Image (tube, rainbow, N blue to C red):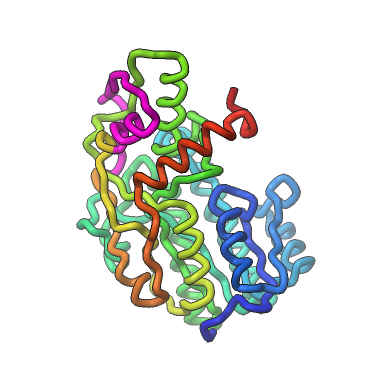
């Protein structure tokens, strides 16, 4: 499919009301699609093939951007390995198959950095994706998403389907999930630090040793990358979306404490898992193929996220 895919097209965005999806829908607007449809999970269970079939029949999209996922941090992954495997696999499998059957012009799916092998050489290159098994705590989720890359490639090969796979690194930003039972590291730390500051607590507790490193991508940058890929990329190879900046969890925690103005102690709990030792992406393919380069620094992004959380925590159900 030629570049310039978005203008004038009817686009369906699964997960479009969620954390990443709402930013993707905003970014799509500047490309002037004819319509953007967002099926809500409370009304449409995309794990059910008949529901997927009805959604596509009703909306008749020309482009599908599949962002809907069942996700969480290390703790949530450890508690729900079967659910995270099944829900993510069947949603993607059914949606791509039904999209193929109705002749969708382009299918875009967001994968996950959790698909990479546990000891992938840093920075992670897309060609290393199949050189080992993912880190154990999130392997079921990662393998489910990895299988959807194979589905996209095989559908392209057999049916000529214009399906692409984009692999965003750990995201953060406004509208993130701040529920401590299921959140990822940045929103969890922001909530812990802000609450400790408000309570004047002398310390916070943090998981693991702090030695693991991660790369983080501000959600608006990720949304822009997904839209650029939708509009201008049409090859079978998956593409990393990242910032290219790596930081240890210990340094990240110190940074959040500094930016939130919290002076207390950080107590590390080494009985909790660190997860994958390192995560940092090679982002040269995204830049070369569709000109994506992240623009938001980690410091600026965290400042904005802290500010958003403090202003909106009541609205998102946090007292």
What's the residue at 26%, 49% (across, down)? 246
Which sits in the foreground, 10 or 181?
A: 10
Q: Is residue 89 in view from this perspective?
A: yes
Total number of numbered discs in the rendering: 0
What's the residue at 46%, 43% (across, down)? 304
Determine whether, in the image, residue 229 is placed left or right of residue 22: left
> From which residue to which does the magenta span run?
252-276
| Position of residue 2 measured from the top left corner of the image (x, y, whole percent) | 53, 86
Q: Quadrant of the N terminus?
A: bottom right
What's the residue at 31%, 27% (across, down)? 272
Determine whether, in the image, residue 100 is placed left or right of residue 269: right
| Position of residue 51 measured from the top left corner of the image (x, y, whole percent) | 73, 57
The relative height of residue 127 versus residue 103 in the rendered view (above or below) is above
127 part of magenta stretch: no
255 part of magenta stretch: yes
Which sits in the foreground, 56 or 187?
A: 187
Q: Is residue 130 in view from this perspective?
A: no
Location of residue 132 by image quarter? bottom left
Which sits in the foreground, 313 or 210?
A: 313
| Position of residue 319 measured from the top left corner of the image (x, y, whole percent) | 59, 22
The relative height of residue 214 versus residue 185 in the rendered view (above or below) is below
Location of residue 292 by image quarter? bottom left
What's the residue at 25%, 37% (across, down)? 251
Determine whether, in the image, residue 318 is placed left or right of residue 271: right
Location of residue 284 by image quarter? bottom left
| Position of residue 190 measured from the top left corner of the image (x, y, whole percent) | 43, 32
Q: Residue furthest right?
A: 58
């Amino acid at each position: 499919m030629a570049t310039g895919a978005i203008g004038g097209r009817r686009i369906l965005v699964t997960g479009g009301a969620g954390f990443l999806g709402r930013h993707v829908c905003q970014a799509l607007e500047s490309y002037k699609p004819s319509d953007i449809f967002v099926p809500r999970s409370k009304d449409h269970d995309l794990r059910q093939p008949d529901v997927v079939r009805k959604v596509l029949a009703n909306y008749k999209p020309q482009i599908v951007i599949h962002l809907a996922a069942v996700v969480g941090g290390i703790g949530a992954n450890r508690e729900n390995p079967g659910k995270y495997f099944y829900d993510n696999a069947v949603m993607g499998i059914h949606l791509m198959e039904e999209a193929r059957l109705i002749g969708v012009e382009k299918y875009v799916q967001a994968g996950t950095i959790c698909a990479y092998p546990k000891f992938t050489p840093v920075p992670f290159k897309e060609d290393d994706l199949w050189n080992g098994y993912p880190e154990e705590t999130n392997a079921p989720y990662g393998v489910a998403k990895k299988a959807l890359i194979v589905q996209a490639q095989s559908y392209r090969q057999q049916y000529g389907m214009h399906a692409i796979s984009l692999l965003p690194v750990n995201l953060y930003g406004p509208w993130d999930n701040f529920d401590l039972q299921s959140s990822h590291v940045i929103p969890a730390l922001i909530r812990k630090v802000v609450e400790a500051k408000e309570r004047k607590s002398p310390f916070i507790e943090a998981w693991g040793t702090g030695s693991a490193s991660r790369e983080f991508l501000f959600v608006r940058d990720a949304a822009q990358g997904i839209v650029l890929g939708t509009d201008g990329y049409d090859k079978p190879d998956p593409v990393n979306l990242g910032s290219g900046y790596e930081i240890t969890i210990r340094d990240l925690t110190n940074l959040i404490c500094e930016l939130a103005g919290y002076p207390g102690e950080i107590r590390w709990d080494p009985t909790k898992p660190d997860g994958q030792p390192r995560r940092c992406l090679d982002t040269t393919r995204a830049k070369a193929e569709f000109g994506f380069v992240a623009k938001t620094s980690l410091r600026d992004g965290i400042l904005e996220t802290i500010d958003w959380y403090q202003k909106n925590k009541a609205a998102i159900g946090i007292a």
